Amino acid sequence: MHKLFFILFLNFFSLLTLHASESILATLSNISSNSVQEFSLSQTRFLCRSYGVLTLEELSQNAKFNSVCQESIKVFYLKYPNLEQYAQQKLKIMQKYKIEFREGRCILYANGQESYSELLLKNGLAVLKPVFMDKEFRYTYNKAQKNAKLLKKGIWAEAIIHNCMESLYKK
């Protein structure tokens, strides 16, 4: 049974990579965190990570164990517990979402033409990847991040980004 699932899974993702710029409609089946959502398409399930950004969870995972970065993010979520549940507030289980795949990540259209990555950036819950060169999204994502920084939203209200510089440039 596991082999059959694995073969179906590989076929599904090989199909997606052939048509990576095309969008699909998939049903949100689970929200693990602000970083990871699980979708289903027919009988196949797959995980989505936001395209072009590093979320606070990813910055924490990339940081050294018990680092100032990890501690800053823990304190941030203790101070703003509703932001740790942002995905659960913004996305709805069993709803269909338009998704595109790029570089092994998802462009999840969460609010019309507005991507989930853009929403994370606007709320200071992610930072633009340092070497993000996608011409289609670069301007919009950069504008969203600059606006969050100007309004001191999310991580820009705290010193988190300075505490996480090392993990920001790790990958």
Image (cartoon, rainbow, N blue to C red):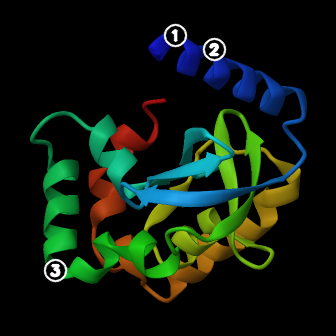
Residue neighbourhood size for the residue with mark 1, other residues' Cα within 10 Å, grouped as few (<14), some (14–19), many (≥20): few
Dot 1: element: helix
Estimate the x, y position of residue 145 in percent, counting from the top left.
Answer: 59, 71
Apparent side of residue 67 relative to residue 135 in the rendered image (left or right): left
Residue neighbourhood size for the residue with mark 2, other residues' Cα within 10 Å, grouped as few (<14), some (14–19), many (≥20): few
Where does label 3 land, which residue? Answer: 79
* Identity of the residue furthest to the bottom in this view: 151
Say which of 4 and 10 sits in front. 4
Say which of 34 and 149 sits in front. 34
Dot 2: element: helix
Q: CA distance from mark 2 to mark 1?
A: 6 Å
Q: Which is nearer the N-term, disc 2 or disc 3? A: 2
Mark 2 is on which residue type? Ile
- The answer to whether the residues at label 2 and label 1 have Cβ atoms under 8 Å apart is yes
Q: Residue at x 84, y 37 (%)?
A: 20
* Identity of the residue furthest to the front in this view: 1
Q: CA distance from mark 3 to mark 1?
A: 45 Å
Residue neighbourhood size for the residue with mark 3, other residues' Cα within 10 Å, grouped as few (<14), some (14–19), many (≥20): few
Q: Residue at x 60, y 82 (%)?
A: 147
Where does label 2 land, which residue? Answer: 7
Dot 3: element: helix
Estimate the x, y position of residue 166 in percent, counting from the top left.
Answer: 35, 39
Mark 3 is on which residue type? Lys
Is 157 above or below relative to 17?
A: below
Estimate the x, y position of residue 149 in percent, counting from the top left.
Answer: 50, 77
* Residue 156 visible somewhere in the drawing: no
Where does label 1 land, which residue? Answer: 3
Mark 1 is on which residue type? Lys
Q: CA distance from mark 2 to mark 3?
A: 44 Å
